[in-house]
Image (tube, helix red, strand yellow):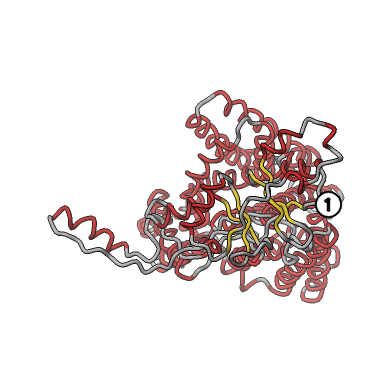
């Protein structure tokens, strides 16, 4: 809602665009930022954020700040909150899907251990650093106020922005143990942060350490129950209802109900908070809906496929709005406490995840620097800062908000680069995904040239055959290196456990030295799975087909297609060179078909 004071300033309101025009300008900024990011070879999310920052700067330059222009620009974006809610709902719904029962049986304990160590170290590091900095730079505020501020900052430091992290992983089509662990840690971090923050805040308010407004003080324990258990319960109910709707209605109607549900939940949280004081936590509810739907719904991938198709403009708008609303001015007010928060959170994430990986014994499979992929921070902590401002009647609330909003600028711009670095160095991104992506345009072709080639025949002009500048794509451009392979000595139970948690349809088997032993086909396992006599007699190498080939990294894609056609498998092991039998990665048939379709000029 526009500030009533602005109604007295017609010159300002005449320049400030309305919500519709503003969102159109934001999508244009997203397009420009996306192309700039592609040119600079950085994640598109950074381009979207930069587009929002530049748009805000241009509009600000058109208005005299002394006339309330900054307030008017902020108010103009408020009606777009529904887009933010929908985008966050989509993102947290996807993150919640990581908590699928089958996946958690295999990787859940590992993710939980790493998450607890990493979160604990972040809390301790941020608490110690900010306490020291605040007491040194602001001794007049007292020890008690400094400790409360440091505790809340420590908890806030646990959160990882789900939006930026998921968007980068999807943009580069990352896939593998490091990617799945990052997604799991994002979910664990945010659940821990939301529950711990609200619990600690309300307990401190009950003890008198935090001055809460009368309405919140009156319903203190009800607010605690609603923001934790109540949010999860609401998510469970909504997830079950969405699963039933998904099973009974067409996808188009299910998608409409999905959008309506998340917009209503997002707006409902704010309405309850404004009019009744206590409210549920929308982010925790959305995460729970995704987890329940993934475990309960029949063929949940159908809805997720539709949502992935329509989500791009929503995500683009979300990130441009985030850039538009970034509080760049808060960077100059971070002070010693803010600087300590930024440094201590980086150190805590890095060392905590590293220790967690070592504790789980996964140092060979997971990048020990995985903690750097958890630095993105935005929506969750911005919501916590808003909650603190509304419910903490103290100067410390403003300081908490300043530190959070200022640090978000740093983490949201630097974090996506570190996410990309982690999965690329971990070998979970195909080389072709790092090349300049051109949609329906073949690599190396000119858009203008292709348009003229299509136009000239309509005018009766013959066109000359063009030259192809791009070199041939090879297996190394579409393979993944950081993959889990089945040990030759695995017994039948271990084989079945591996198959249950694998994302592939065929399962390469290797000896201890990495030499290829063969590929297990699911049909071969099906023949022995119900015969108890085989349980202690059969190992993976007994089930493997040794006639499956090992393709070389420099094999052209056309030849790779022939190998897939000849052997009728969904995945093939890759060796460093022709004739090598030591497996260095895997290549999937669907990635090959996608690459061939793209280079032939189809939509990518």
Residue 188: percent from left, percent from top: 74, 50
Task: State the residue in front, 484 or 241.
Answer: 484
Q: Is residue 428 visible?
A: yes
User: Outermost residue, top direction?
Assistant: 248
Image-based side of 218 in relation to 95, left or right: right
Q: In the rendered view, would you say 520 is above or below 240? A: below
Q: In the rendered view, would you say 297 is above or below 210? A: above
Q: In the rendered view, would you say 358 is above or below 82? A: below
Residue 517: percent from left, percent from top: 72, 54
Q: Which residue is mark 1?
A: 204
Could you say which quadrant of the image residue 431 lies in?
A: bottom right
Q: Is residue 60 visible?
A: no
Image-based side of 234 in relation to 70, left or right: right
Element assignment for label 1? helix
Task: State the residue in front, 259 or 434.
Answer: 434
Could you say which quadrant of the image residue 8 lies in?
A: bottom left
Residue 59: percent from left, percent from top: 41, 64
Residue 3: percent from left, percent from top: 49, 52
């Amino acid at each position: 809602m526009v500030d009533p004071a602005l109604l007295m300033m017609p010159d300002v309101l005449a320049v400030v665009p309305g919500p519709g025009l503003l969102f159109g300008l934001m999508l244009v900024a997203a397009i420009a930022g996306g192309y700039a990011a592609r040119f600079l070879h950085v994640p598109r999310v950074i381009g979207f954020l930069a587009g929002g920052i530049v748009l805000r700067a241009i509009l600000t330059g058109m208005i005299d700040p002394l006339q309330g222009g900054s307030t008017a620009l902020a108010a103009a974006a408020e009606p777009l909150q529904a887009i933010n809610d929908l985008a966050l709902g989509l993102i947290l719904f996807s993150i919640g899907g990581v908590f699928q029962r089958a996946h958690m049986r295999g990787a859940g304990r590992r993710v939980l251990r790493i998450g607890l160590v990493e979160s604990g170290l972040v809390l301790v590091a941020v608490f110690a650093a900010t306490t020291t900095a605040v007491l040194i730079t602001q001794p007049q505020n007292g020890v008690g106020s400094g400790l409360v501020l440091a505790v809340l900052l420590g908890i806030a430091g646990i959160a990882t922005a789900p939006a930026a992290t998921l968007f980068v992983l999807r943009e580069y089509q990352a896939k593998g143990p490091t990617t799945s662990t990052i997604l799991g840690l994002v979910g664990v971090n945010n659940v821990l942060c939301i529950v711990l923050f609200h619990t600690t805040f309300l307990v401190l308010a009950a003890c008198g350490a935090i001055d809460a407004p009368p309405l919140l003080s009156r319903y203190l324990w009800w607010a605690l129950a609603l923001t934790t258990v109540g949010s999860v319960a609401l998510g469970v109910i909504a997830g079950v209802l969405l699963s039933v709707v998904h099973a009974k209605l067409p996808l188009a109607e299910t998608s409409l109900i999905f959008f309506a549900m998340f917009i209503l939940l997002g707006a409902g949280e704010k309405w309850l908070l404004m009019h009744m004081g206590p409210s549920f936590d929308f982010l925790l509810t959305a995460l729970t809906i995704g987890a329940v739907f993934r475990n309960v719904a029949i063929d949940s991938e159908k809805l997720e496929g539709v949502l992935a198709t329509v989500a791009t403009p929503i995500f683009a708008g979300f990130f441009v709005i985030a850039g538009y609303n970034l509080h760049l001015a808060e960077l100059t007010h971070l002070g010693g406490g803010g600087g300590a928060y930024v440094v201590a959170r980086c150190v805590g994430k890095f060392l905590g995840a590293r220790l967690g990986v070592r504790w789980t014994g996964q140092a060979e499979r997971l990048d020990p620097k995985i903690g750097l992929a958890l630095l993105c921070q935005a929506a969750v902590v911005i919501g916590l800062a808003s909650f603190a401002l509304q419910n903490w009647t103290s100067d410390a609330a403003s300081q908490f908000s300043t530190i959070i909003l200022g640090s978000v600028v740093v983490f949201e711009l630097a974090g996506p680069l570190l996410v990309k670095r982690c999965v690329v160095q971990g070998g979970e991104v195909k080389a072709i995904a790092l090349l300049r992506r051109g949609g329906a345009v073949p690599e190396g072709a000119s858009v203008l040239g292709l348009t003229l080639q299509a136009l000239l025949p309509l005018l009766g002009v013959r066109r000359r055959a063009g030259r192809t500048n791009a070199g041939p794509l090879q297996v190394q451009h579409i393979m993944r290196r950081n993959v889990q392979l089945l040990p030759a000595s695995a017994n039948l139970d271990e084989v079945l456990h591996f198959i249950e948690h694998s994302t592939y349809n065929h399962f390469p088997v290797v000896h201890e030295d990495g030499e290829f032993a063969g590929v297990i086909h699911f049909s071969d396992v099906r023949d022995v799975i119900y015969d108890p006599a085989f349980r202690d007699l059969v190992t993976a190498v007994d089930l493997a087909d040794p006639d499956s080939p090992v393709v070389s990294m420099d094999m052209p894609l056309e030849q790779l297609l022939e190998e897939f056609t000849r052997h009728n498998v969904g995945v093939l092991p890759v060796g460093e060179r022709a004739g090598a039998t030591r497996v260095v990665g895997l290549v999937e048939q669907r990635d090959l078909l996608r690459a061939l379709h793209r280079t032939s000029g189809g939509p990518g």
